[in-house]
Amino acid sequence: MNKQTKKIGYWRSPRDLVCTALAVILGLVVGYLDLHVTEVVVTVVALLISGLLLGLIQTKGTWRWALLIAIGLPIMEFVAIKTGMHTAEPARLDPLIALVALVLAFLGTYLGVFMRYLIRS
């Protein structure tokens, strides 16, 4: 087994572990950002850039990065509701917003994979 395929628990490589941690952190940051801005475009751009970054870093398991980024929005909404966090707009758990966030995160990650493919070619 070479270094690229050596498994670390669930993860196939150290890069998978780093990308998982980065995706969770970026998802929570995007969720926090969404709570404190009133412009939707800021959240959309943050989701796309976060996905793009992770798609460029690791092309395998791209769906995981998108899912971990997108889940940050409902998690932060839940935290805001439970803790009474001061937000720009009233916090509410909306499944449609979570679905749109998931689509945008997928779009960003697969755009990153495509860009990496173009760079390698």
Image (tube, helix red, strand yellow):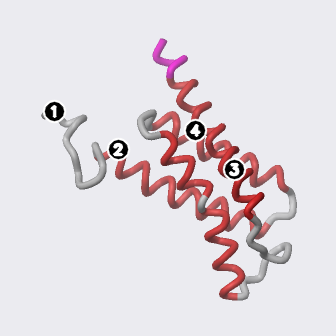
Number of the label disc, if any, that sits on residue 109 = 4
Q: Amino acid at mark 3?
A: Ala
Identify the element where label 1 is drawn. loop
Kind of residue at disc 1: Asn
Are dots 4 and 3 in contact, CB under 8 Å?
Answer: no
Residue carrying label 2: 15
* Residue 10 to residue 1: above or below: below
Q: Which mark is residue 40?
A: none
Q: Which mark is residue 46?
A: 3
- State the CA–CA distance, disc 3 to disc 1: 35 Å
For marks 2 and 4, the one nearer the N-term is 2
Residue sitting farthest toward the left: 1
Counting other residues with Cα less than 10 Å from the Cα at mark 1, is it few (<14), some (14-19), or many (20 or more)? few
Q: Amino acid at mark 2?
A: Arg
Residues in magenta?
A: 117-121
Total numbered labels: 4
Q: Are there few (<14), some (14-19), or many (20+) residues within 10 Å of tag 4? A: many
The mark found on residue 2 in the picture is 1
As rendered, which of 51 and 68 lies closer to the eye? 68
Q: Earlier in the sequence, mark 3 or mark 1?
A: 1
Assign a secondary structure to mark 3.
Answer: helix
Distance in Å between CA atoms under marks 4 and 1: 27 Å
Viewed as shown, does residue 50 lie left or right of 64?
A: right
Write down the quadrant of residue 81 in the picture: bottom right
User: What is the C-alpha distance between the residues marked 4 and 3?
Assistant: 12 Å
Tell whether label 3 touches label 2 (CB within 8 Å).
no
- Tell me which residue sits at (52%, 37%) in the image: 55
Q: Where is residue 40 shown, x and y percent of the image?
A: 83, 55
Q: Main secondary structure of the magenta part?
A: helix
- Label 2: state its secondary structure: helix
Q: Is residue 85 above or below residue 21?
A: below
